[in-house]
Image (tube, rainbow, N blue to C red):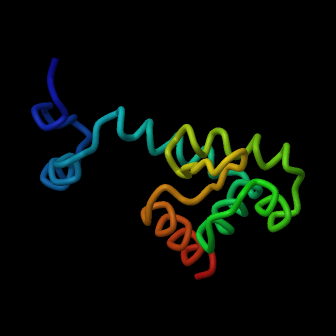
Amino acid sequence: MLRHSDEPSRPDTIHPESVARARTGQVSDDDLTGLADIFQILASPSRLRIVEALAAAELCVCDLAEVVELSQSAVSHHLRPLRQLRLVRVRKEGRRAYYRLDDDHVTTLFKTGMEHVRE
């Protein structure tokens, strides 16, 4: 099987050098699927509100529900896929669970997206 960089140019390719340059360093299908999964999960205004709140502070579900104005049940429902994709992490303290963003990449992703929307 030919890899992208080994594929010959199609007859209708006008700029084969530009095509070759664009193919250089393309990410794997698995990585693209992972990124698509993240964008799909973040395609919910409620989940984005949760991310926004957790960018400001670590919160338990009851406080997070108050901030985003959803029921605790709804917040827990939204946190599950965020946790599965490692966008948020949980810390247990007794019977209470505290959530925070997994790392600074999540904050950067949110802030960069907001900057783009506001331009």
Residue 25, image x and y in percent? 19, 48
Residue 48, image x and y in percent? 68, 60
Relative vertical location of residue 38 with respect to residue 11 in this rendering, above or below: below
Relative vertical location of residue 74 with respect to residue 51 in this rendering, above or below: above
**Identity of the residue furthest to the bottom in this view:** 119
Left or right of 28 in this view: 114: right
Front-most of 111 and 22? Answer: 111
Relative vertical location of residue 58 with respect to residue 46 in this rendering, above or below: below
Instruction: Determine the image quadrant of residue 83.
Output: top right
Instruction: Determine the image quadrant of residue 66.
Output: bottom right
Quadrant into which the N terminus falls? top left
All told, the count of numbered labels is: 0
Left or right of 44 in this view: 21: left
Quadrant into which the C terminus falls? bottom right
Residue found 44% across the figure and 66% down from its top:
104
Front-most of 59 and 52? Answer: 59
Left or right of 43 in this view: 37: left
Residue found 49% across the figure and 55% down from its top:
102
Left or right of 111 in this view: 48: right
Front-most of 58 and 22? Answer: 58
Relative vertical location of residue 16 with respect to residue 55 in this rendering, above or below: above
Residue 13, image x and y in percent? 23, 44
Residue 36, image x and y in percent? 50, 42
**Identity of the residue furthest to the top in this view:** 1
Residue found 18% across the figure and 55% down from its top:
18
